[in-house]
Amino acid sequence: MSTLARERRAAGRPVGAPDPVPFLDLGAAYAELRDELDAAALRVLHSGWYVLGPEVEAFERAFADWVGVREAAGCASGLDALTLALRALGIGPGDEVVVPSNTYIATWLAVTAAGATVVPVEPDPDTHAMTPDAVAAALGPRTAAVLTVHLHGRVAPDARALRALCDRHGLALVEDAAQAHGAAGAGAIGHAAAFSFYPSKNLGAQGDAGAVTTDDPALAERVRMLRNYGSRERYRNDEAGINSRLDPLQAAMLAVKLPHVHAWNARRRALAERYDAALRDRVPGLRLPVLPADAATHVWHLYVVRVRGGAPERERLRERLADAGIATQVHYPVPPHASGAYAALGLGPYPVAQRLADEVLSLPIGPHLEPWAVDRVAEVLGA
Ligand SMILES: Cc1ncc(COP(=O)(O)O)c(C=O)c1O
């Protein structure tokens, strides 16, 4: 019997009829902690306290300690966390913010929501991250900040060099850590960092949520003021803020899940290594993600391969996988500059971002995916 068949039998699955492989099973994460999550939700419902308050404060304290910074300020989403971090840093109209040309559009949306201007920089095609040289070349008299993104769960390899560059030029470094909970350094390298707790993230809520982390208590205090209508004292509004408070129900869910994230990340890492062992040099036309020398710097939010031959070949591969019951996704098919949101600005061309958008394919990965599923994906890919 093959290893695959043995593992499937051990997992109680029929050998003859392959089970579908979901892209990510959010129900499994709930099932693992159901009793604790249910109890925490009921505690909030029974408390009569539904906006900010002790649940939010307790999670903020726990998350700051976990990230290794002095402060965490909760808010309603990762996009709001990015926007609030920029606004709290004083970035607004007339300022330029350096951003990667290849990122989820929320990175750019935060800059424009703050009233500032995006200055896109092409990434290194191998690491998918901006290099300090490319960022330095994009700096100008109006640059106020650099926004680095820990894409796919890997801390941007040059994040610390970018911090040094920003410090030398009196600029703010903001980390988009939406995909990198628990990666070594994530959230503690920049002057501020933004996390998303969207349900599919490595630490996900049961709905939308986000947080800003920082070592600067004054900055955290400004985020808390801006997230609450610009108010420090009820019905006194110092600035034109927004309503983006972390929901206590979500804070309670996140507090239950937080102690499990490192173990979940270890499972993701093991699956990424299994993909690497199964696929490397075995599937012509597939380029695999780099396993970083320091494994702790990558938490494998996504396992993203590149398909030589671009979008048409990728579609063929996706169909083959879908026919075998294997779900895949594309993160992301359209780079921000080419999206409807920014097309009118006429930015670009950004050939590296465009090429990545044409070639990337995300294979299933998650803390509750079983190893046999990786072997099955590899088998269908022809490894
Ligand atoms: C890189 C990146 N930045 C920002 C965000 C925005 O987070 P949210 O969906 O919580 O607004 C996300 C996730 O959606 C993301 O992946």
Image (tube, grey):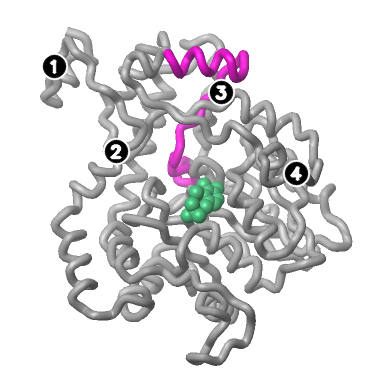
Q: Look at the picture and state if 317 lies above or below 294.
A: above
Tell me which residue sits at (64%, 54%) in the image.
Answer: 109
Q: CA distance from mark 4 to mark 3?
A: 21 Å
Question: Which label belongs to residue 306?
Answer: 3
Mark 4 lies on residue: 121
Quick check: 11 above or below 342? Answer: above
| Drawn side of residue 365 relative to residue 111, left or right | left
Dot 4 and dot 3 residues touching (CB under 8 Å): no
Question: Which of the 4 quarters of the picture holds residue 319?
Answer: top left
Q: Which mark is residue 14?
A: 1
Decide which of tag 4 and tag 3 comes sooner along the chain.
Answer: 4
Q: Quadrant of the rendered structure where residue 57 is? A: bottom left
Range of the magenta residues? 295-319
Residue 168 in view here = no
Q: Is mark 1 within 8 Å of ligand 1?
A: no
- Image coords of residue 204 (percent x, y): 36, 53
| Outermost residue to the right | 141
Q: For residue 208, which quarter of the picture?
A: bottom left
Q: Residues within 10 Å of mark 2 (few under 14, many from 20)?
A: some
Please name the residue that numbered disc 2 is placed on: 25
